[in-house]
Image (cartoon, rainbow, N blue to C red):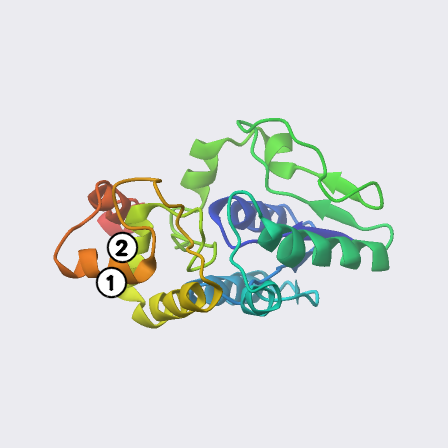
Amino acid sequence: MQIVAFSGGKDSTALALHMAELGEEFSMLFTPTGNELPAVRAHVDAISARLNRHVIVPPGPTLASLIETFNGLPSWRMRWCTRMIKILPCIAYLKEHPGTTLCVGLRADEEERQGLYGDFATYRYPLREWGWGLKEVRDYVRCVGVPKRTDCAVCYGQRLSEWWMLWRDWPEWWKQGERWEETTGHTFRSPGRDTWPAGLRDLAAEFSKGRVPRGTDRLLQQEEPCRVCRL
């Protein structure tokens, strides 16, 4: 049995689409955090329907449940979110289904990495098999409409410009982040990381004054329109 590790990003999307185009059989494994923006799950469902491939969602915790359990927020120093929400549920599924081949979307131009999950499964890296780097992946998915973000809405690792876009476009998700900060006494952003406030409530106050982070224009222009639509 082959499974594509599917995050909904450009690499895993290109991987699934081209494997299907080549006639390969596989299912898609998606490990949600429960804090993805709606476009992510919509994209996963759309690709599943387009390819007629089953989406496996192994049981696992959500970001909200772990924040409540630990009374803390994930950070650069404590990245328990990735391990507990993404890696461990995948490991559990692979152990329950011996003989599985997990297809991972690591590109040919990325640092060499091997299977992160252990020797209880076989691993393939089809993008590397095809010699596909970033250019090939972007060209291939140009007309698919991949979500700009597939991480958590309130990920500690996101850029300041992405926080600004979350504040502007998804106020309910922003407010949830504020509540988690107030409840735990911690902030998603590291204090002293830059000259902007670390706490989301104070950060929102700065955004409300009309301050826009450097690089926001560049982020807004990252979406690559379909070449067909230019004709």
Count neighbours of disc 1 (C-alpha within 10 A) and say few if under 14, some if 14 to 19, many if 20 or more: few
Q: In the depicted view, which residue is nearer to us: 122 or 165?
A: 165
Q: Residue furthest left?
A: 210
| Residue at x-position 34% and y-position 66% | 174
Question: Is residue 206 found left or right of 185 in the rendered image?
Answer: left
Question: Is residue 25 found left or right of 152 in the rendered image?
Answer: right
**Residue 6 visible in image:** no
Instruction: State the CA–CA distance, disc 2 to disc 1.
Output: 6 Å
Task: Please name the residue that numbered disc 1 is placed on.
Answer: 168
| Residue at x-position 28% and y-position 48% | 161
| Tag 2 near tag 1, CB within 8 Å | yes
Q: In the depicted view, which residue is nearer to us: 2 or 41?
A: 41
Q: Which mark is residue 146?
A: none
| Residue at x-position 44% and y-position 50% | 156
Instruction: Say which amino acid is labelled 2.
Output: Trp
Task: Please name the residue that numbered disc 2 is placed on.
Answer: 164
- Where is residue 43 drawn, in percent x and y? 47, 62
Q: In which quarter of the image is the N terminus?
A: bottom right
- Where is residue 144 drawn, in percent x and y? 42, 53
Q: Report which quarter residue 67 is drawn in.
A: bottom right
Say what secondary structure mark 2 lies in. helix
Instruction: Say which amino acid is labelled 1.
Output: Arg
- Where is residue 31 drawn, in percent x and y? 62, 60
Q: Report which quarter residue 170 is drawn in.
A: bottom left
